[in-house]
Image (cartoon, grey):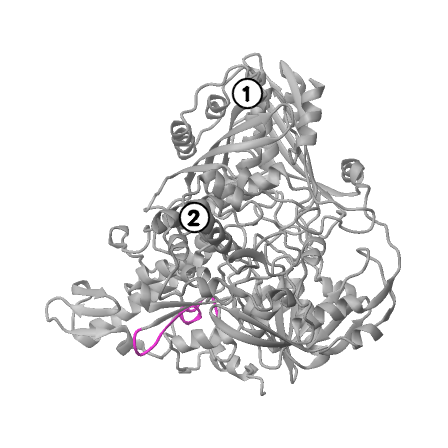
């Protein structure tokens, strides 16, 4: 049954009309709102590439029904910063060249944003633990950790 | 919507000596990405115009058959082309892997993009630049040797007169054969090559502005999901799609033999519809019992034995040695496991097929799709779009074939997105590999005979891998090539008697294909572990023992720089660390395929004697791939090689039952996570005067053996079965 779901994405209010309110938030963001930051990786909340912030906390958008996001504030990678006005995490990932294919990087940055909101000066071990459920296949991990550290320093 | 298509006539117009002008500027590169152009352009690899075009403004478009699989080669190729042409970095754009625009430079595989593809592009650029200088000399009335060129503007140093590339050739063809002997820019004049230029794709990737394959859309595009058989070779008895028809946006069920797919207007609709289809499959249980895999491999019908290295007479020397050693190694079935499952978009109209794919081999894909659909290759165009990291022939081509098959049924653009389970279960696999090594040592501990035998699936004539859609639908299909997996079985050491044999097997449990460092990883694992075993038997230091048997100054320098960086000291008695956490370090070395890139590594590991867990703490890597194009990009690749291969060595092991793959997600096919990632220290040996060699694979080749040798150093146990899981480690610890 088609239904309207209100939600705020990157500061903009939307009233999304969808066939199925159980549709994961990821598909609304990618297909209805044409946002390409969050990515489909597993659909099982196992890899983290779909991560977005919902009311400030990192959430796996591939498993969150759209109805559960109703009325909430969603921030995607696009909303974190833009090429013209980079978020410190985005800037740090560029400075460290912490990308190979980059498919997982959305999740790494969004998860790190969640971490840095709660812990302003994480240790390397805390960064590794915070990202333990975000998978990268290219093996960019050492640079990703460096980038998160650098971002924390930039934000201090 | 009208489909923009390219006609065969367009190709014919440019394939001969006819002079055809065409307007080419950056908008073409842009249009090509969107599939909107009607290009009439040669793709001949022996023509400058195949690779390079310069528009009236002096902007350069490079046409590369090799593609960026997430490795950064787009940036590196831009550096090469801009430097060779004496234009600025910003003046160059690259079109990658478009069968209508880019030459067939072979698959993007084998660590050959810079080494072969980049060198070819460099030579095309050098040929173009020389021709432009000749033309400029005539137009400016100047001698060639007094011309200077910068940012695509040629000036006479005596008269001060100038002329630009745009004025000389803008928008027109060069009509020039690629000259393999065109002089290259002197090394001393490079301004981009050899520098850590930031990657061009990263700003877009960290801000969500980059268009991956998965983001690509076409007007009127439909979404499809394939319903896979319950077992690998089960056949479809019947299907019932009544429930699927009630899903909003449902369009159609497509069935062709055992190929079954649901098509819907929305992506979510296609997922729900595919789940709603009730399919009845026959039972099939033809996979070998995984617990007896190596008996199965050993018992598989042999096609033939092929000797790849034959020095002296091992049959005579082996029994004559003072003592003999032997060891058997095995290496598990691995899957690619890209983080983004395969995805493709296909559009079929008026007998023309256009496919957007993350294929590492768009020209090959085009031939395969044409064969499957009984079309002429000229009527098929494949365009590359970057996807999730690709480490070999994974599911990209299969997703493209799914999309092509469905698009032909519907006559509309169709996007196919594989699920995680499809990616893990239906993409081709790195085959199970069994290796048997024997050696004889003399009284002084030197190797007098060395024999190796590797059990690997046979190579057919072609380089294709069978498309899943062709198999399921009963359409014409290709054979399955496993990759050149006999490579690097031959050893770099100067033993007096050597015999390295590949035993080609008639079959292997899963459709094989090449996964990063195919065969070279497995073969080097056994070679370098066995070399360590020989050194231990001789009571020699593993590094000194290798150097003793190496007559290769460049290789010795690589080893020397690695052990100095790692502060290597001769190892004492193995297993001397008696604590619960036992630390050790291991060494390994390769000259890739015996003809190119040198890598020497030292691995530091910590073995938990209580849990059996192995933590790789550190890797030191010395790397010589000749001329370095982008040092930081190269380091990124080396780090990736190490980390990905630590994952493969310690954790990865495809699971299956008698009918199907059961390792279908990240719980059942786990990979390395952040806490398990080692530090990586790298020493790049840059040789700007040498030719560049590949770097996408060689480091990975030495990772499993270095870890195994480090474990031996730590606890005195030889790990001869990859992966080195806690279970295997504990069992080995308890057995001593």
Instruction: Tell which subunit mark 2 falls on.
Output: A
Magenta stretch holds residue B13: no
| Residue B286 visible from this viewpoint | yes
| Residue B691 visible from this viewpoint | no
Mark 2: secondary structure: helix
Q: Nearer the viewer, residue B416 or B13?
A: B416
In percent of width and height, residue B91 lies at 32, 68
Q: In which quadrant will I find the N terminus of chain A?
A: bottom right
CA distance for labels 2 and 1: 43 Å
Image point (25%, 70%), residue name: B134
In percent of width and height, residue B466 lies at 70, 60
How many numbered marks does the figure carry?
A: 2
Residue B576's image quarter?
A: top right
In percent of width and height, residue A84 lies at 35, 66
Range of the magenta residues? B44-58
Circle number at residue B535: 1
Q: Which residue is tagged 2?
A: A148
Instruction: Tell which subunit mark 1 falls on.
Output: B
Q: Furthest residue to the top? A: B443
Q: Which class describes the residues within 10 Å of circle 1: few (<14), some (14-19), or many (20+)?
A: many
Q: Nearer the viewer, mark 2 or mark 1?
A: 2
Residue B140's image quarter?
A: bottom left
Q: Which class describes the residues within 10 Å of circle 2: few (<14), some (14-19), or many (20+)?
A: many
Q: Vertical placement of B79 versus B525: above or below?
A: below
Image point (82%, 58%), residue name: B230
Q: Furthest residue to the bottom? A: B2
Magenta stretch holds residue B54: yes
Q: Nearer the viewer, residue B134 or A46?
A: A46
Circle number at residue A68: none
Mark 1: secondary structure: helix
Query: With B547 as the anchor, is A134 left or right in this view?
Result: right
């Amino acid at each position: 049954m088609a239904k309207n779901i209100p939600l705020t994405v990157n500061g903009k209010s939307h009233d999304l009309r969808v066939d199925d309110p159980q549709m994961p938030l990821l598909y609304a963001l990618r297909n209805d709102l044409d946002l390409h930051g969050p990515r489909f990786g597993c659909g099982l909340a196992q890899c983290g590439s779909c991560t977005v912030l919902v009311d400030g906390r990192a959430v796996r958008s591939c498993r969150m029904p759209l109805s559960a996001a109703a009325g909430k504030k969603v921030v995607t990678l696009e909303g974190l910063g833009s090429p013209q006005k980079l978020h410190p995490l985005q800037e740090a990932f560029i400075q460290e060249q912490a990308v190979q294919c980059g498919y997982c990087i959305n999740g790494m940055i969004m998860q790190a944003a969640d971490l840095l909101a709660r812990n302003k000066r994480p240790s390397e071990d805390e960064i590794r633990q915070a990202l333990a459920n975000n998978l990268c296949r290219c093996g960019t991990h050492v640079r990703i950790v460096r980038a998160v550290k650098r971002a924390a320093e930039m934000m201090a | 919507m009208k489909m923009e298509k390219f006609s065969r006539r367009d190709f014919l117009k440019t394939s001969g000596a006819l002079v055809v002008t065409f307007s080419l500027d950056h908008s073409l590169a842009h249009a090509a990405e969107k599939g909107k152009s009607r290009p009439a352009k040669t793709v001949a690899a022996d023509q400058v115009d195949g690779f390079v075009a310069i528009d009236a403004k002096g902007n350069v478009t490079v046409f590369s058959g090799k593609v960026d699989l997430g490795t950064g080669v787009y940036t590196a190729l831009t550096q090469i082309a801009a430097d060779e042409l004496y234009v600025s970095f910003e003046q160059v754009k690259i079109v990658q892997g478009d069968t209508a625009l880019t030459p067939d430079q072979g698959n993007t595989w084998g660590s050959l993009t810079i080494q072969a593809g980049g060198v070819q592009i460099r030579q095309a650029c050098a040929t173009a630049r020389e021709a432009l200088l000749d033309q400029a000399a005539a137009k400016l009335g100047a001698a060639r040797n007094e011309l200077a060129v910068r940012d695509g503007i040629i000036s006479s140093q005596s008269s001060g007169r100038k002329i630009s590339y745009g004025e000389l050739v803008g928008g027109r063809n060069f009509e020039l054969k690629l000259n393999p002997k065109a002089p290259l820019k002197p090394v001393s004049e490079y301004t981009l090559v050899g520098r850590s230029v930031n990657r061009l794709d990263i700003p877009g990737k960290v801000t969500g502005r980059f268009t991956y394959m998965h983001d690509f859309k076409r007007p009127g595009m439909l979404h499809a999901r394939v319903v896979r058989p319950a077992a690998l070779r089960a056949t479809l008895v019947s299907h019932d799609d009544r429930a699927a028809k009630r899903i909003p946006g449902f369009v159609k069920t497509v069935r062709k033999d055992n190929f079954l797919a649901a098509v819907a207007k929305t992506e979510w609709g296609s997922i729900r519809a595919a789940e709603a289809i009730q399919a009845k499959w026959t039972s099939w249980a033809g996979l070998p019992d995984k617990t007896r895999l190596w008996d199965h491999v050993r018992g598989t019908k042999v096609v033939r034995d092929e000797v790849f290295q034959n020095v002296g007479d091992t049959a005579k020397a082996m029994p004559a040695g003072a003592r003999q050693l032997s060891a058997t190694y095995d290496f598990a079935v691995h899957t690619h496991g890209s983080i983004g499952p395969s995805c493709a978009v296909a559009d079929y109209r008026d007998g023309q097929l256009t496919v957007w794919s993350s294929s590492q081999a768009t020209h090959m894909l085009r031939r395969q799709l044409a064969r499957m659909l009984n079309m002429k290759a000229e009527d098929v165009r494949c365009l590359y779009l970057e996807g999730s990291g690709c480490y070999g022939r994974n599911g990209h081509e299969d997703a493209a074939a799914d999309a092509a098959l469905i698009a032909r049924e519907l006559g509309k653009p169709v996007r196919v997105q594989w699920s995680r389970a499809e990616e893990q279960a239906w993409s081709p696999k790195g085959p199970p590999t069994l290796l048997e090594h024997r050696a004889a040592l003399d009284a002084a501990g030197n190797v007098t005979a060395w024999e190796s035998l590797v059990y690997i699936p046979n190579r057919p004539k072609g380089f294709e891998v069978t498309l899943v859609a062709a198999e399921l639908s009963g359409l014409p299909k290709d054979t399955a090539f496993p990759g050149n997996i006999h490579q690097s079985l031959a050893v770099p050491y100067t033993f007096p008697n050597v015999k390295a044999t590949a035993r080609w097997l008639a079959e292997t449990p899963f459709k094989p294909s090449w996964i990063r460092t195919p065969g070279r990883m497995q073969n080097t694992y056994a070679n370098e572990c066995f070399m360590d075993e020989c050194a231990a038997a001789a009571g020699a230091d593993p590094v000194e023992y290798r150097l003793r048997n190496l007559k290769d100054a460049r290789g010795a320098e690589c080893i020397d720089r690695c052990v100095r960086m790692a502060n290597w000291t001769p190892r004492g008695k193995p297993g001397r660390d008696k604590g619960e956490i036992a630390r050790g370090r291991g060494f390994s070395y390769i000259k890739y395929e015996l003809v190119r890139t040198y890598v020497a590594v030292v691995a530091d590991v910590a073995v938990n004697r209580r849990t059996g867990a192995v933590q790789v703490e550190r890797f030191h890597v010395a790397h010589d791939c000749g001329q370095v194009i982008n040092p930081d990009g190269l380091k990124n690749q080396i780090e990736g090689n190490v980390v990905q291969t630590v994952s493969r060595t310690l954790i990865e092991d495809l699971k299956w039952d008698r009918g199907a793959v059961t390792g279908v997600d990240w719980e059942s096919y786990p990979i390395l996570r952040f806490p398990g990632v080692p530090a990586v220290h790298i020493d790049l040996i840059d040789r700007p005067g040498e030719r560049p060699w590949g770097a996408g694979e060689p480091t990975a080749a030495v990772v499993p053996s270095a870890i195994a040798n480090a474990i031996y150093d730590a606890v005195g146990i030889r790990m001869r079965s990859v992966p080195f899981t806690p279970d295997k480690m504990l069992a080995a610890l308890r057995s001593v």
